[in-house]
């Protein structure tokens, strides 16, 4: 029994394998054909977009079928267990033929159904993809819009930062200038105090009187200078009292002779008396020549 | 904030620089010391006729004003003739304590004329302040020298010099009864005297016309007094008033058309009249039983000052020449003020005053009436202003002789003029010459 069964089994396996092979070839051809058609149908640009956005799962579903049916036979269907007695009889053969035919039809039906389902799934997938693309486009537009808005905002922020920094720098500079001015004012006031102290000292009074006396002794008043004149003369002296420059700034109510006389007076008085305290020395003097008041 | 800091810095600046770095001094009085000047002997490219020392004349003129002190030539270390040479040693001149150095050059032109080139250097400021050239006839070189002095004086003093002007005076010589009277015209320094009239009877009261071309005077050549006018250059003269009684004290109106004269008429009452020289028309100016005489016109011709004893003693009065004007007494100081002469600017009056028993020359300020005695003699007389108003000429007495002297109106400087001829009287200073 076993050998017979074996040989019979052997012959049945061959038929099953061939049948399976044939079905597989048909399915493969159908799938390939559908795919070829399917692949042609979507517009290229959409495809291009899709290529960038499809996810891994979608890509797996889309894995193209192998151009040829797999060479390996499908694992045996549960037929061998269902196999009846090995002795075939024509009725049974006919029945089997019918069964096979029915099976084939069922299989075809199933194939068609599967195909329809696959088409539906594919349509859904396409719809999804389209939706996804739209979504992606919208997202992209939104992202772009957001990016543009962000750029504007950033630019504004940068500008504001810059302006703030400039304002701060300006304020700092102004503050510095103000402080410098205040320091200068303070220095001036201190200098004034020192000068006031020096100017009001008796030594200073004495020195001034000495200079005035010497210039008066050397001022040969022109006869034209009687009343109502005033000459302002700037004098520069060096330590030791030598007069190095005399400039008649103004001479109101007087003539050229008066101008000349006051200028000469200072030169004639050179060297001017020196102060007893060298710290009192002034390089620049301003002399006012005028008639005695009263 | 910025405004505030700006304000602060401005305040700081204002406080810091000028007020502190400079010492303020006030000079209210000066001196009337003469200004030291060196008038260096002028260079001459060719000997000029007469060989006049022009620089010496200039120096003497300047010194006579009382405003200058000339440096003695023996003290000069060099004899520069150009300002460049002076500039080369400004420090040296300064060391000699002179303020100014005047240098010059004389030259003869082919035309026979002489040129005087003068430069004036202020050695204190090291600047040439005058550079001028004169062309004169050799015979007028002295006058040229006076003009040089005028320019230097004006440049330094600020007032026109009056050296190139003339004076007139009366000189008397001989012994009574054989006295000889002469009317003399001379340069303002007394040099170059020329007799324009001679008489053995008294000549008095010479008066210059405003243009300096004519002299009016009183002559007793006809034994009685008469007023004459005489052209100085030609000697041509004419008798303009020989009325009964006294004809005296002529004074020219500024426009030269009229003479103010003192007439007594037959009744002997001296009053002042205006005599029109063209028409001989006579207009009475004063009418008072006292003596009114010695008229002097104001520069604008609108009034006269005169002497009157109507108050009991001689005093000066002013009489406006407009219709209906009343005489006004001007002098109140002392018991005797006479012979008024108005200054060229009309602001002062020179008078003969009795001062502590002596007759002296005084100047009264017409704005406030103060009288300042200038001369120091005992019998001074006849003041007359220089045309620049800086000096007064007068006649004084030395050892019984009348002499001429000038005196600065501040009374500081008097200068005796040379007059060879005997006793001199009644000097009058002429106007500026063109």
Image (spheres, coloured by chain):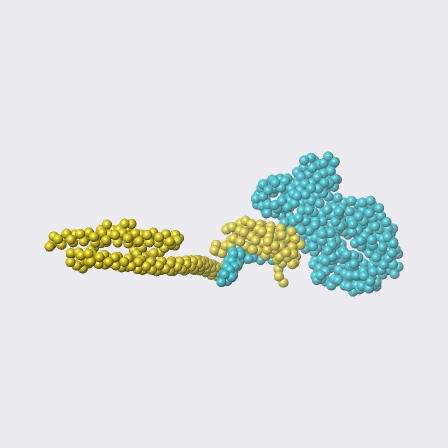
Q: Colour of chain B?
A: cyan
> Which chain is in yellow here?
A
**On the image, which quarter does residue B286 sit in?**
bottom right
Residue farthest along the left direction in this orientation: A1
Does A15 appear above or below B49? below
Q: Residue at x 23, y 53 (%)?
A: A19
Q: Is residue B222 left or right of residue A26?
A: right
Frontmost residue, B256 versus A80: A80
Taking the image as drawn, is residue A19 in sight?
yes
x%, y% of residue B129?
A: 64, 46
Taking the image as drawn, is residue B171 in sight?
no
Frontmost residue, A216 versus A34: A34
Q: Residue at x 41, y 58 (%)?
A: A141
* Circle count: 0
Q: Is residue A45 left or right of residue B146?
A: left
Q: Is residue A113 left or right of residue B432?
A: left
Frontmost residue, A111 versus A2: A2
x%, y% of residue A227?
A: 65, 58
Frontmost residue, A14 versus B219: A14
Residue farthest along the front direction in this orientation: A90
x%, y% of residue A65?
A: 29, 52
Q: Residue at x 23, y 56 (%)?
A: A97
x%, y% of residue B357?
A: 72, 59
Q: Residue at x 56, y 55 (%)?
A: A286
């Amino acid at each position: 029994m076993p050998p017979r069964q074996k040989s019979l089994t052997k012959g049945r396996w061959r038929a099953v394998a061939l049948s399976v092979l044939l079905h597989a070839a048909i399915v493969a051809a159908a799938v390939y054909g559908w795919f070829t058609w399917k692949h042609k149908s979507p517009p290229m640009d959409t495809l291009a977009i899709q290529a960038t956005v499809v996810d891994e799962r979608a890509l797996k579903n889309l894995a193209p079928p192998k151009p040829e049916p797999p060479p390996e036979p499908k694992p045996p269907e549960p037929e061998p267990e269902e196999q009846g007695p090995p002795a075939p009889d024509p009725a049974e053969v006919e029945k089997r033929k019918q069964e096979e035919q029915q099976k084939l039809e069922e299989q075809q039906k199933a194939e068609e159904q599967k195909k329809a389902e696959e088409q539906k799934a594919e349509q859904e997938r396409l719809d999804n993809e389209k939706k996804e693309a739209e979504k992606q486009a919208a997202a992209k537009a939104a992202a772009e819009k957001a990016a543009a808005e962000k750029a504007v905002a950033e630019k504004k922020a940068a500008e504001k930062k810059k302006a703030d920094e400039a304002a701060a720098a300006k304020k700092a500079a102004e503050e510095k200038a103000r402080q410098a001015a205040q320091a200068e004012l303070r220095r001036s006031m201190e200098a004034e105090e020192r000068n006031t102290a020096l100017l009001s000292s008796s030594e200073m009074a004495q020195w001034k009187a000495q200079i005035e006396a010497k210039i008066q002794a050397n001022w040969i008043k022109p006869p034209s200078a009687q009343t109502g004149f005033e000459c302002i003369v700037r004098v520069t002296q060096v330590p030791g009292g030598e007069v190095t420059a005399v400039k008649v700034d103004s001479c109101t109510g007087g003539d050229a002779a008066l101008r000349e006389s006051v200028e000469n007076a200072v030169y004639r008085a050179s060297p001017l008396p020196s102060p007893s305290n060298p710290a009192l020395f002034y390089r620049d003097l301003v002399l006012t020549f005028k008639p005695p008041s009263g | 904030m910025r405004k505030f800091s700006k304000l602060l810095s401005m305040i700081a600046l204002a406080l810091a620089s000028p007020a502190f770095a400079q010492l303020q001094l006030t000079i209210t009085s000066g001196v009337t010391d003469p200004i030291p000047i060196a008038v260096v002997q002028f260079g001459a490219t060719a000997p000029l006729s007469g060989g006049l020392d022009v620089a010496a004349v200039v120096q003497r003129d300047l010194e006579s004003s009382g405003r200058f002190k000339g440096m003695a030539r023996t003290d000069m270390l060099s004899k520069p003739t150009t300002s460049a040479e002076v500039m080369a040693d400004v420090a040296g001149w300064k060391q000699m304590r002179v303020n100014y150095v005047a240098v010059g050059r004389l030259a003869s032109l082919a035309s026979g004329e002489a040129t005087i080139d003068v430069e004036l250097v202020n050695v204190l400021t090291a600047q040439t302040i005058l550079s001028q050239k004169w062309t004169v006839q050799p015979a007028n070189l002295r006058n040229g020298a006076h003009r040089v002095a005028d320019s230097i004086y004006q440049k330094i003093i600020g007032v026109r010099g009056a050296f190139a002007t003339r004076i007139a005076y009366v000189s008397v010589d001989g012994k009574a009864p054989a006295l000889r009277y002469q009317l003399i015209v001379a340069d303002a320094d007394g040099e170059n005297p020329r007799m324009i009239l001679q008489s053995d009877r008294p000549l008095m009261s010479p008066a210059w016309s405003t243009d300096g071309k004519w002299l009016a005077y009183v002559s007793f050549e006809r034994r009685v007094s008469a007023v004459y006018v005489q052209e100085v250059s030609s000697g041509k003269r004419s008798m303009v008033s020989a009325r009964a009684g006294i004809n005296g004290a002529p004074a020219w109106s500024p426009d030269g058309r009229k003479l103010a004269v003192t007439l007594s008429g037959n009744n002997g009452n001296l009053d002042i009249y205006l005599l029109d020289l063209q028409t001989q028309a006579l207009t009475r100016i004063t009418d008072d039983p006292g003596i009114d005489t010695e008229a002097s016109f104001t520069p604008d011709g609108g009034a006269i000052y005169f002497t009157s004893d109507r108050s009991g003693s001689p005093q000066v009065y002013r009489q406006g020449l407009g219709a209906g004007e009343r005489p006004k007494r001007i002098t109140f100081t002392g018991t005797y003020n006479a012979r008024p002469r108005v200054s060229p600017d009309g602001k002062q009056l020179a008078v003969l005053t009795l001062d502590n028993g002596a007759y002296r020359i005084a100047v009264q300020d017409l704005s406030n009436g103060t009288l300042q005695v200038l001369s120091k003699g005992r019998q001074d007389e006849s003041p007359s202003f220089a045309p620049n108003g800086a000096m007064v000429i007068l006649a004084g007495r030395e050892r019984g002789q009348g002499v001429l002297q000038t005196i600065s109106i501040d009374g500081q400087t008097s200068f005796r003029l040379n007059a060879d001829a005997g006793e001199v009287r009644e000097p009058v200073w002429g106007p500026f010459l063109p």
